[in-house]
Amino acid sequence: MLRNFKVLFVVIVVVILSAATYAFAAANTVPDTKAGDGTGTVSGYTVTDVVYTLNATTPTTLDSVSFDLGAAAATGKVKAQLVATTGTWYTCTQVGVTTVWTCDTSGLTASSIDQLRVVAASN
């Protein structure tokens, strides 16, 4: 009889724990969300019409570089690097409402330029 009581006690405990777990899970609310998977084309920009503007007083330094990306880019998301070893990125600003951008490089020595690397994003 003691054994039956132990089994009955264990069954009652399991039922109580199951009911408590169900009640807790039923009380949770989760807001509606969205998730998805998809593909989109990522294409690069074509940089053309590059213009290096030398300083009028000290022509051995570069004041700016400008170029045409050929497509729209987001404000604040266009940068240029002209010297590979320093890693300095220059922030570029859009010229009017065109696809032309200019980057202020004041003080950069013209002879140190060894590349023109442009990074841009559309959004």
Image (cartoon, rainbow, N blue to C red):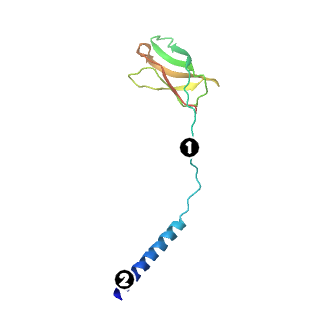
Q: Earlier in the sequence, mark 2 or mark 1?
A: 2
Name the residue type under label 2. Answer: Lys
Q: Where does label 2 land, which residue?
A: 6
Of 99 and 106, nearer the camera is 99
Indicate the position of residue 98 as horizontal and vertical percent values: 64, 23
Q: Distance between the residues labelled 2 and 1?
A: 53 Å
What is the quadrant of the N terminus in the image? bottom left
Of 121 and 58, nearer the camera is 121
Mark 1 is surrounded, within 10 Å at the Cα level, by few (under 14), some (14 to 19) or many (20 or more) other residues, namely few
Name the residue type under label 1. Answer: Asp
Q: Where does label 1 land, which residue?
A: 37
107 is higher (above) or lower (below) than 75: above
Indicate the position of residue 85 as horizontal and vertical percent values: 38, 22
What residue occupies the far right of the structure in this picture? 97
Front label number (2 vs 1): 2
* SS assignment at label 1: loop
State the residue at coordinates (47%, 69%). 21
Q: Quadrant of residue 32?
A: bottom right
